[in-house]
Amino acid sequence: MTWRRHVAPVAIVLGTGAVYVVAAKLGLRLAFVADQVTLVWPPTGIALAAVLVFGNRAWPGIAAGAFLANATHHEPLGTACGIAVGNTLEAVIGAWLLRRVGFDAALERLKDVLVLVVFAALASTVVSASIGVTSLCLGGVQPWDAFASIWWVWWVGDAMGDLIMAPVLLVWARAPRLGWQPRRVVEAIALLGSLLGVGLLVFIEPVGARLMRSALPYKVFPFVIWAALRFGQRGAVTVTFIASSLAILSSVQGWGPFTTGTPHENLVALQLFNAVVAVSALLLGAALAERDTAEHRGATDYSRLQVSEGRLRVALDAGRMGAWDWDLLTGQLDWSENLEAIHGLPPGGFGGTYAAFLALVHPDDRDAVGHAITRAVEEGPGYDIEFRTVRPDGTLRWVAAKGRVMRDAAGRLARMIGVGTDVTERKRLAEELEQRAAELADADRRKDEFLAMLAHELRNPLAPLSTSLHLLQLDVPDRQHLVQMADRQVRHLARLVDDLLDVSRITHGKVTLRREPVLLSAVVEQAVEMIRATTESRAHAFTVSLAPEPIRLDADPARLAQVIGNLLSNASKYTPRGGSIWLTAERAGGEVAVRIRDTGIGIAPDFLPHVFDLFVQGDASLDRSRGGLGIGLTIVRNLVEMHGGRVEAHSGGLGQGSEFVVHLPLAQEAAAGRATGRARRAPASAGNGLTILIVEDNQDAAESLAMMLRLWGHAVETTFDGLAALELVARHEPDVILSDLGLPGMDGYDLARRLRERPGLEHVVLVALSGYGREEDKQRALDAGFDHHLVKPPDLDLLAELLRRVVGTTGEPTRARR
């Protein structure tokens, strides 16, 4: 790279100088008026091209070449130096002027051709002609009276050099365009051959070619046009160079059309021909190049426009958008096909007017849309509104329209442009989100209310329990009454917990109905028995009216009794003392309608639609005298729907009582059978005693349960972890083991599995005690080896019945799921 940087400038100077000398020697042979003045001076074009291509590094070569060419032509050294200075300044000034105006050496713009003619051929050549002729006269080579004629020929010759020689060198100096097809090569050969043939006829005039004299030399113009059209500026300058060379050479030899007049006439005609051909060819080549460039740019822009339009169309389709353009002067309103589709119109189906647009807007939104458009036109550029549109098929869609007002050059309102977007789905989602947010907020509020209510309901029974325990410690009279009071409150707490577990299992679909043929009368009898004590204590007039014929159902009797019991319990709770409650059942087609009506406080109309919602209660007063968690009716609705029925609530308003109607499908006759009600058994208090082991880590719970079992006549031992239980069983095998599941170390499941693995313990009845009462909890206990599962605190009636069955059983006990 360093070598090239040092050698390149020297090579440019030497090469430029050598080419200049050779061209000058050839040019001097064309001397016309004086030995130093020629018809065309090729070195002028060579020098200008060298400075434009190589920069100012070429001027020393130009100066040296000009000096040598003139010094070796028998010119005085002073004259040769002056001519060399003029030729060098001519090239440097011409190149500087061209660069100042942004000249492009490719000559593919009309501007470049014109500046070459004006600044190079016409302007810069004045410098060389003036200095050169002055040097000839000062050196005594030419007389001063010949100054004007010599100056004219010198200037014209240099101008022809810039117009003929410089374009050829500048255009061909560009990187050659490779890859010409064979057809193009053949056409180029045909063009050059035809040009040479016609040129010889025109300019050499062989024998028999006198007919060509009348056409003059302008017969070459078709070849100039051919070259420019087919080969661009390269072809144009090449044909110009060849035609001008033929014309000059023939004239010097005394041949051709430019030798028939006086020397002055011949010179004018020849130079005029050369100038016309050169300038015409350059202008034609530049014009065609600009046309081709414009066409190429237009094709490229059109291709880009198509791509852009395609992308825009895809974007509009993807975004459910369409464009519109409203000419405010003519009133014409244009819609894209996308926008027509948004409004349910076929392509081209829009009327194209503002009135046609308003006709599609929902009547309730037209005023708002019109006001927004008027305000945008009168006050500001923006237009942004959402409105409903009515499609031809009557469907409603939401559209978001955005637009801007455009003004013309005079500042007058000209048009509005914008887009319309189908936002129906967004509106729907927003409404759903808003509704969901409201539901979540309501659920959160109800949760807070429920937690406060739950705290209230749990504390209510704890107060009398605490008081009863303190009184029992003081050994007050009427201890039996205190015990009964504590028993009622414990049962109330157990019911609250059971209700919570029930609603959780039911709402999550974890309750499985144990359907069997059952008589409605048996279910009603069991439900009535559940609330009899409450109705009697409140002196309610309770009437039960059932159909005379048996009504058979395919249902879970326990769950169905729970439904009717909950409704009866609510009726009793919300009916004042001395009020009336009616329970009636009657057939209605393929179903039975069970009605429970009361004369209670009734239900407010605004609360009636929400009466079955979870954690909702009509009694929101501070005292909450009627208690409850607001989940009973939710349980009722879910259980009824699980049975394939439905439940309804009716009320005339506050103070008008209420009525709940349960609709249940009747059982198929083939499956009908008489079901018997399950009678409530009293707890055992004596009998054949069992040996029972209690495994419970809560010492108070273990000892209190052991006291109760001993009162019933059983022998009881207690232990507080699984390992100790295994040791006790190894020493003495019990009849029954009541075990907690959440034991420290070895839990109840592992204990059951270990016990079942021991031989000889097959007859031992294992009963799980747990605070978890889900179906999967019970199943897990049974899978581990337990025979029964009781929820804490255990129902003493159920426990007594279970032990009574164990006493009366011989062999391996039957496993039951409770």
Image: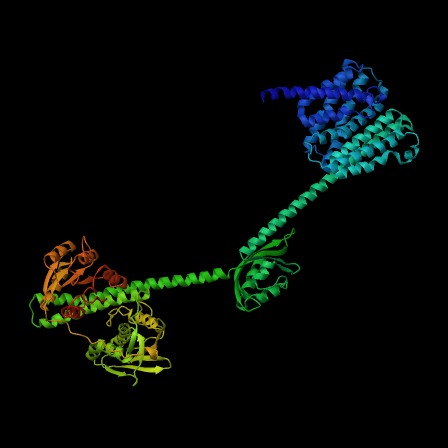
For residue 22, above or below residue 397: above
Q: Where residue 73 sits in the image (x, y, percent)?
A: 80, 16
Is residue 680 depicted above or below 774 in this figure?
A: below
- Of 563 and 70, the residue lying toward us: 563
The C terminus, quarter of image: bottom left
Between residues 569 and 261, which one lies in front from this camera angle? 569
Residue 624 position within the rendered picture, expressed as x and y whole percent measured from the top left: 25, 70
Q: Is residue 540 above or below residue 424?
A: below
Mark yes or no: residue 382 visible: no
Counting from the top left corner in percent of width and height, residue 570 is at 27, 75
Q: Is residue 49 left or right of residue 385?
A: right
Residue drawn at point x = 82 percent, y = 38 percent: 222
User: Which color scheme did the rendering employ for the protein?
Assistant: rainbow
Residue 771: % across, % down:
22, 62
Which residue appears at 85% of the width and 18% of the height?
143
Residue 180 located left or right of residue 800: right
Horizontally, residue 106 falls left or right of residue 761, namely right
Instruction: Please state which of residues 802 and 229 is positioned toward the viewer in this rendering.
Output: 802
Residue 112 visible? The answer is yes
How many marks can you see?
0
Residue name at image x 36 percent, y 62 percent: 441
